[in-house]
Image (cartoon, rainbow, N blue to C red):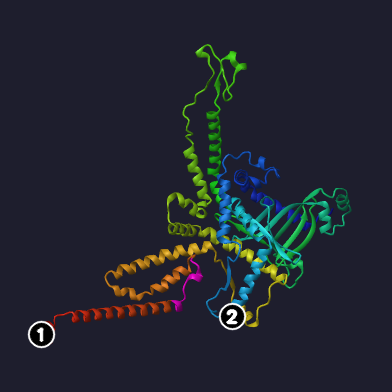
Amino acid sequence: MQSSDLAKEIVKKHSSLIKFRTPYEAEWKDITKFITPGTNFWDEIKDNKAKASSDIYDGTAISAVRVLANGLQGYMARKGKFFNLELDTYSVRRSEPRPYLQSVENLFNWIFDKSNFYDFVNESFRTGATIATLVAYIEPINNEKLLFHACHPKNVYIAANDQYQVDTVSREMMMAYRDVAKRWEITDVSFLEKAKNSPYEEIKIIHQTFPRTDRDVTKWDKKNKKYASIWVIEAEKYLLEESGFDVFPYIVWRWSTEHGGTYGRGPAHDALTDVLRSNLLSKDLLDASQYFLNPAWNVPQEKMDLLDINPGGMNPYADPSRIVSPIQTSGSYPVGKDVQASIEAKIKDHFMTDMFLMLNNSMDSKRTATEVMEMQAEKAAVMEPTTARIESEFFDQLFDLVFYHAKKLGWVEPPPEDVSQILQTSSVKINYNNLMSALRDRHYDNQMSYAEVQKLFQMAEFDQSVLDVADLKEYARELLSKSTFPHKAIRTKRQMAQIAQQRAQQQEEEMQSENLKKQAGAAKDLSQADPKVLQQLGS
């Protein structure tokens, strides 16, 4: 097969990306070995899970990753509506776009429900919590649904631009000769012969996507699109396909980056030292328990063949100084148990598991439900840098790509003319109204509002009229509307006015009834009074 200059350039760039990622791989290997053994992709373990976990003696980190991934999904992307669309402008206050935006929201939910979206999100959060760098793409399937793919971390390499945004992805994959020959129109005789004689033998393919700097913007062909898409056979440096994309086709999310780094750093990186310590200590404690439960024995030489240490076994002896006896070890309590509990608590703290298990943990501490919610709100505020990045770098990219594919497939209905005019001057933003954002808002509102209300009541101790300044009923409505309290259970202002009117009427009736009772009592007292006294009073 004849090589091409473009293919050589792609292979060279791929090699440089491999070299750039190499320093990160040492930590990745330990993370996958001790924290996600089921996905340890550095060794050819395949489906042998027993071998994958043979070096693990403590499963705290494995459990913590599962809790973190499931918790993030439950709090940020639960099945159902976890978002809404709104105009990102202050100049438009009209309600015309709302029905159209609602129809787009329904389209998103239909796409998510019909695809593997929720499984993909959980897998993405697991990758984010461990390797901390996720590369994914979306594939339309027969104009019927979208399929979400998370790329294998071992086979994907990335590069970022001067604004720290990833704009280059180079993937390597193994494909069978017959599949390569079927997908691309290859005319090379030797390759076709190989595909015929050894159809299942695999060959490494490189797919590289990057921004084009030399394209002709006046042309609309695939070779002049904004992002290049190049497929190459690595060994032969043979160009399979040159095309392109109008938008960057990948979702690249990093849990966090340090000093403008390209690859991410997540909870597993911070917890790795404690995970290794806990694993080593658990192994030592296991060995210690085996020594305690099955100790070594002192056995006289002449009784080696007669030894019976089974339950109920009998070992006769004549000389008390030559009996079978266990070797006594000093102490029976594993002194490392407290140390291990401390390390396990640190591991759980790295993965923020208490945020998602706070209600369960509160049973031991006897906290009230209100206290638990306040603590959850505080944790949600602490997690804001992480959750904000998830929303901006993961979900925002995902929604943009889903809308791009849906529009390209003809699933998006064009807006009405009046709405189209509004959308031309206004952008649409995604508002994530999930449980995490509700807790976060609750914390900030409570911290600011409660302090002000407390000051108000302190001033009212000197002058009650100060309370007339604030509409406390409206404040209560606002608090409930931003909480997890059911919105349908919050009374409207009209209902509140009716209740206030009924209460005032009831109070007036009670006052009239009380006056009548007083008048009747006075009349009774007069009827029972001495006539002489009444005559004197009258005179």
Give coordinates of residue 269: x percent, y percent: 56, 48
Describe the element under mark 2 as helix, strand or loop.
loop
**Three-letter residue code for mark 2:** Glu
Residue at horizontal 82%, vertical 59%?
184
Q: Residues within 10 Å of mark 1 (few under 14, many from 20)?
A: few
- Inspect the magenta stretch and tell me whether residue 28 lies in it: no
Closer to the camera in the image, 243 or 537: 537
Is residue 316 positioned above or below 539 on the image? Answer: above
Q: Earlier in the sequence, mark 1 or mark 2?
A: 2
* Residue 148 showing in the rendered view: yes
* Mark sitting on residue 536: 1
- The magenta stretch spans which residues? 485-495
* Mark sitting on residue 96: 2
**Three-letter residue code for mark 1:** Gln
Give coordinates of residue 247: x percent, y percent: 68, 66
Residue at horizontal 56%, vertical 40%?
279
* Residue 256 showing in the rendered view: no
